[in-house]
Amino acid sequence: GSGYVADSVNHRIQKFESNGNFITKWGSYGTGDGQFYYPYGIAVGSDGFARISYIADLSLKFVRCTNADCSTKNITVLDSASGEGINEVTSLALGSDGFARISYYHDKNDDLKLIRCLNDDCTSRNTTIVDGASNTGDASSLAMGLDGLPRIAYLDDTNNYLRFARCTNADCTAKNLTTVDSSGIVGEPHISLAIGADGFGRISYYEDGTSDDLKFARCTNDDCTTRVITAV
């Protein structure tokens, strides 16, 4: 087997064998064909080819690779805005239907949004504001729960709080929102979310304070209203 890595610092995608040996890479900084601007979201479809979400030209874009090296692909613009536009971290996971779910921060409107793709190339999709509080939704990380519904960890930029959203329907028009860490020193863009065998969230994040710690939150219920937080 093989795996893909979104190398956001170098604006490219890398492919590795399961033993870690490098296979190939593609992409560079820019807005042209085959170029990226801080790609963050990546997943592999049932066809073995990558799906990528990224930001370019102040727009959120989605790539469905149609071969292993992504030298052929379909690109769809999912959302765009003038001014500050969309210019932050995006996260991607695949649903049980094989279609992408994408979380991202809309800079112009200062909110967390979720896209549920309704076909392979995401030319048909539903878009929902998950958290519309001012300046909330940056550095999001998305994972699919055992119930097939999205979970999102993200930053409340106004207060520097770590927040968690559990969607209770497919488009996340219904959801439960929780503040996981209110110490006020959660740093960006270092937030990552995974789901444990118990179905509860596991969140790693950076404490941007005097300690500069890597922290870990183990949610002990669905909404992460109870959790254990550790400085790793």
Image: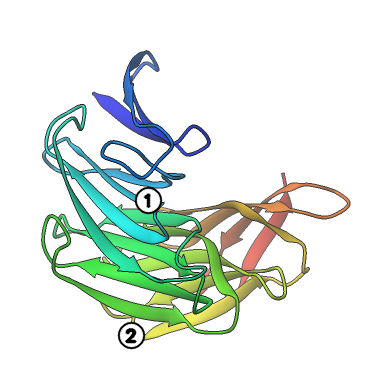
Rate crowding at label 2 as few (under 14), some (14 to 19) or many (20 or more) other CA atoms within 10 Å: few
Q: Relative to residue 204, is residue 106 drawn left or right?
A: left
Residue 226: x %, y % from top left = 61, 72
The quadrant the C terminus occupies is top right
* Tag 1 secondary structure: strand
Q: Which numbered circle lies on residue 8?
A: none
Q: Is residue 52 above or below residue 34?
A: below
The residue under the point 24% across, 69% down is 116
Q: Which residue is mark 1?
A: 54
Is residue 149 something one can see in this rendering? no
**Which quarter of the figure has residue 76?**
bottom left
Residue 191: x %, y % from top left = 57, 54
**117 and 35: which is toward the camera:** 35
* Colour setting: rainbow
**46 and 231: which is toward the camera:** 46
Instruction: Kindly give the residue lying farthest to the top in the view shown.
Output: 21
The quadrant the N terminus occupies is top left
Q: Which numbered circle lies on residue 173?
A: 2
